Image (spheres, rainbow, N blue to C red):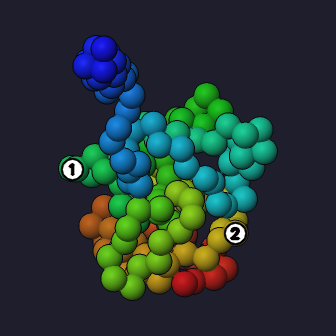
Amino acid sequence: MLTNRFLNLQKTVSLAKNYLHTSGERYEIQKLTRLRVVDNSEIGKQAMAEGKPPRCIHVYNKTGVGRIGDKVLVAIKGEKKKGILVGLKQNQKTKVPKFDSNNLVLIDDNGTPMGTRIHVPIPTILRTILKEKTQAKGADYTKILAIASKFV
């Protein structure tokens, strides 16, 4: 009788493994990741107030995993907008701070930010990253650094 119970328990556990998600939580930006808009753009403020944060549609790099300073395409309030990642939850390299949320600054097609202020501190490593991308891509990402109020 004890063996029957053990066999039934084994069957239940094996069935549960098929239906339950057992992998660990991943702190990286990929498709369908929710982001937090940290500038004062009108569309960003409305989306965050309604409790419908933007979701990542595409990451503009070869790996498909967003890192700090990468450009992403997001769906926000039924529209497609581009943005720059300025703070991430995932483990970072040395001397790059780890944030509590995945922060995003919305930009236009030519790289100018849609807002006029960034409300959270941004990492100082972002200065070198965005300056390199400005020279390589032709878009002017240095304006994001100009509207930042604090650096970490």
For label 1, the residue is 62
Q: Which residue is mark 2?
A: 119
Relative to 31, is 3 above or below? above
Measured Cα–Cα span from mark 2 to mark 1: 30 Å
**Residue that appears at 70% across and 54% down:** 41
Is residue 23 depicted above or below 79 in this figure? below
Circle 2 Cα neighbour tier, 10 Å, few/some/many (<14 / 14–19 / ≥20): some
Q: Is residue 131 left or right of residue 88?
A: left
Q: Quadrant of the N terminus?
A: top left
The residue lying toward the viewer, choosing from 115 and 48, is 48
Q: Give the mark nearest the N terminus, 2 or 1.
A: 1
Question: Callout 2: helix, strand or loop?
Answer: loop
Q: Please, which residue is most extreme toward the front here? A: 1
Return the residue nearer the eye: 13 or 23: 13
- In which quadrant of the rendered view does residue 92 lie? bottom left
Q: Secondary structure at mark 1?
A: loop
Q: Residues within 10 Å of mark 1 (few under 14, many from 20)?
A: few
The number of callouts visible is 2
**Residue 151 sits in quarter:** bottom right
> Looking at the figure, which quarter contains the C terminus?
bottom right
Q: Amino acid at mark 1?
A: Lys
Q: Which mark is residue 23?
A: none
Instruction: Residue 140: tell me if it is visible.
Output: no
Amino acid type at image mark 2 = His
Say if 109 sits above or below 130 in the image: above
Taking the image as shown, residue 43 lies to the left or right of residue 32, namely right
> Can you give x and y, in whole percent of width and height, for residue 58 in the image?
38, 40
The residue drawn where x is 63% and y is 54% is 37
Q: Residue at x 41, y 55 (%)?
A: 27
**Horizontal and vertical percent for residue 24?**
36, 47
Horizontal arrangement in the rendering, residue 96 relative to residue 143 (left or right): left
